[in-house]
Each structure stands twice: as structure tokens, then as C-alpha cells.
Amino acid sequence: MTFNFKNVYINDVATIAGPYEKKGPISKYFDKSYSDFYFGEKTFEDAEVKMLSESVNKVLEKVGKDSADVFISGDLLNQIISSNLTALNLNIPYLGIYNACTTSTEGLILASSLIDSKKIKSAITSVSSHNCTSERQFRYPVEYGGSKPKVMTFTSTGACSAYVSNQKSNIKIESGTIGRVVDMGIKDVYNMGGVMAPAAAQTIYDHLKDTNRDISYYDLIVTGDLGIYGKEILKKYMQEVYNIELKKYNDCGVMLYDLENQDVYAGASGPACLPLVSYSLILKRMMKGELKRVLLVATGALHSPTLVNQKKSIPALSHAISLEVVE
Amino acid sequence: MDKEKYKKLVDNCCPKENVLINTIKSFFIGGFMGIIGQGLIDFYSCVFEIPTKDAAPYMTITLIIVGSLLTAFGFFDKVVSWANAGIIVPITGFAHAMTSAAMEYRKEGFILGIGANIFKLTGSVILYGVVAAYVFGLLRFLMFGG
């Protein structure tokens, strides 16, 4: 299902990042980054809320507004508590959403639909993830050090907000594709790249089919958080199943960290991974004129520890957003 | 593409874990831990002039304290990612799993936090350890008369 949007623009974005991201190759593009995991708060959960609130305040400051019509936000924690508590401090009408690591594009699609149908004029869409809060919820206590397989990805720490409205800017949200849930039978909780690659492939294919475009239409296609091995799986899968060769393609999980020197296994993951890279590096490149059309394909593993313990495989979902530079 | 074929594609793209090297490394590190344990037993039985049997619990307590302290200072998880099972399987691993859970849930209070979660990872070790001790104790009694 693909929507075309006529009059929706990203006015500005804000990115707040954690310590590993700070040491990564694109840290100079973030609005702010912290050197530890607590950010001066008592718990990791409070730290995530602080980071998310800061990203919202920062984007409001950048666009010079004090509010928006709707705040749409999601994160990885149970009951999306980081978003809920951020919304409590904001006093803006709030939609809380969850699609795991594809929440960022889900939020953009929802905001764009509301704006394009003239229900609202502006929205802030946000996501956050924190390595320590999600690690303890989905895996083990933070200080526990069981041995980690090479295919595992490292949950990124970051909060990203975008101010989206009908006011013209250089970056237009041109269309969005809502993905379908895919389950290819992978049960390995460490291999999320393998779980999510078919969902990304299906959404890219759906998007190209719905919009009647060739893959060469885009200057760059980025997936969310497949990691180094997931990226290779997607390329091969795309070729074999849809006969599409991914050339101008990269994965944000591979771009966020220095994989040679940082101990992050197969790369970054988490809802903040795609916006941390695309709201910083990719938008900058679009503003400079190096890229004109970009397809953001966030990828989410709809992972539940309960279902995995019950020996069920992990379903995945992916939503895409197409961004274009307007002269 | 069917699920079987996809699983093959995934397996081809992903790196294999080096089981042989990991096993050898764990074997030697685990063995080294054994030497340290034996050294501690000899040390305690010599210093306190007690029988070897009585010195063993002192050794266990020492290793648990060291494992817990290293966890609290944030070193242990880094050592494990290098030493793997060599250091997780001995009693140090048990101490590490318990302490890391306790640290994690401290913020949720002493009863519902630490109390309810300290054995989150190690609960199964305790349960099946007790069951196994009971079963083998019974077998020993039936076969050898105690």
C-alpha cells in the first residue's frame, strides 16, 4: 500500500546520540551526543526519556515554533514508556506507536497522511532507543557478559525528532509505503538481519511496483538496521526473488559505527538507528545536492522474548518513506 | 522462496563461529581457573591449618567475591566476551550472573527488584543443581549404601 503525498515537508530534524554513536564516523552531524549511558539521570529509562525530550525541544527550537498539532512517537520499551513520559511533559496531542525498529517510518507515514489530508498542519514524529534499556528488556542484564555471536547487532542509543508540516522546505516527503508482515521461519534471536531482510525486500518491491518506478529512480536506498550480514542477505534475496539488483544501496546499521574499531559485532540496530543516520548524514547530503531522491526503508523485527521462548519464529515488518529535494 | 531455501541463503551469508578455537580456549582458561581454585584450597589449608575438605568452601567464597566485585566494577563482562565458557561455567560465572541481575534490578526496590530477580539467570542452575544432587545422592545410596 503506497500513498503519494502532495504537500508534506520535513522542516527540520534533531538528533541526540549516546556514547558509542559519539565515537562513530558520523558523530559530527548529531545535534548533541553524550559520553555515558546515564546522561546525569538515575536510571537508564530516565536517561532515554531525557534524550527523547531533548530531541523534541531541539527540533522545536530549530524551526522556531513552540508546539505542533500532533506528537507521534514510539520506542522499544514495554508500553512505549519513553514516548509516553516525553508526551506527558510536552502537552501536545499524542499518538503512541510501536512497530519495533520500523517505528520511525511508520510515524512519518502517519504524520504525512494527516497533513496531506488537511486534518492537521504540523506534526513532530520521534523515536528513541537506548542500548541498556532494551538490552535488559529483550536480552540479559546490562553487566552480564555471556559470549556474543558475530551476527548479533548492537542496539543504538539515540533519539530523533522530525518536524513535518505543509510549510514548504527543501525536503519533501513524496510518498510512503506501508509494509506487510513477513515470517521466513528464522528463530535465531541474534540474527535480526536474517529475520528482517525479506520484509525490507518485499517493501522495496511493493514500493517500486505501486509507484511504477525502476530501482534506478533513487539515488540512494537505505535500510534500517540489517547489519553487515543482513545487508548481504538482502542483496542476494532481492536478486533471487525479485530479480532486482541493489546498487545504490546501504544499511544504516553499517553506517552508524566504525565497525573495524568499535566492539559492536555486526553493526547497529534499534528504532533510532535509521533516523540517526538519515536525519544527519543523508539529509545533509541531500541539502548539498549530492542526493536528490532517497528511499528510507526502516526494518523492524517484531521480536517478543515470550514467543521466542515458546519456540516460535520471529516476524518482521518494514515501512518505506521516499524523500525528494525540492528546488 | 520457501523457508528451507531462505535458511540456506542466510547460513551462507553469515559467518561461522569458530567452535574448535573457542573450545580449546575455554578448556585452557577453565583449567587455569581450576589451578587457581586448587591453589586457594592449599593456601587456606596451610594458613589456617585446616583439612582440605574444610578449605574448599573458603575457596568457593573467595572466587564468588572476586567474580562479584569484578562484575560490579564492570570488568567481568569484558573478560567473558574474550574468555567465553572458560570463565562462565565455573563458580565465577554463577557469581557474575547473580550480581549483574542484582545490580540491574536494584532500582526497582529490594523486594520486587533484587529479591524477585536476583536468580533470574541462575535460578535454573540452583533448581537443576538441587534436583541433580538429590538424584545422584539417591543413586549413590542405593548402589553403594551411602
Image (cartoon, coloured by chain):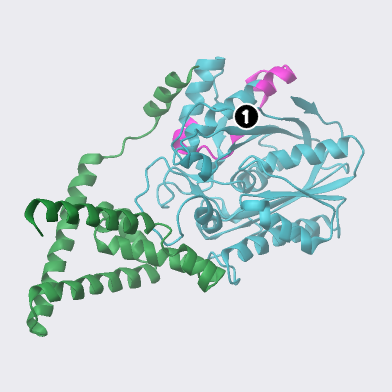
Chain colours: A cyan, B green
Q: Is residue A58 visible?
A: no
The amino acid type found where label 1 is placed reads Val
Residue A34 x/y as whole percent? 58, 64
**Is residue B47 shown above or below B5?**
below
Mark 1 burial class by Cα count in 10 Å: few <14, some 14-19, many 20+: some
Q: Position of residue A114 (x, y in %)?
A: 85, 39
- Magenta region includes residue A1: no
Tell me if I can see residue A226 in this picture.
yes
Q: Toward the viewer: B41 or A54?
A: B41
In the rendered image, residue B25, in percent from the top left (x then y), is placed at 20, 50
Q: Looking at the image, how many numbered discs can be counted on the residues?
A: 1
Numbered disc 1: what chain? A
Q: Is-magenta flag for residue A219? A: yes
On screen, residue A151 versus residue A110, left or right, reads left
Front one among A41 and A88? A88
Give percent across and percent down for residue B81. 33, 54
Q: Residue at x 42, y 62 (%)?
A: A143
Q: Tell me: B133 left or right of A222.
A: left
Left or right placement of residue B20 versus residue B42 in this view = right
Residue lying furthest right in this view? A118
Against B60, residue A306 (above or below) is above
Magenta range is A206-231
The one of A143 and A233 positioned closer to us in this rendering: A143
Q: Which residue is mark 1?
A: A181
Q: Nearer the viewer, residue A282 or A276?
A: A276
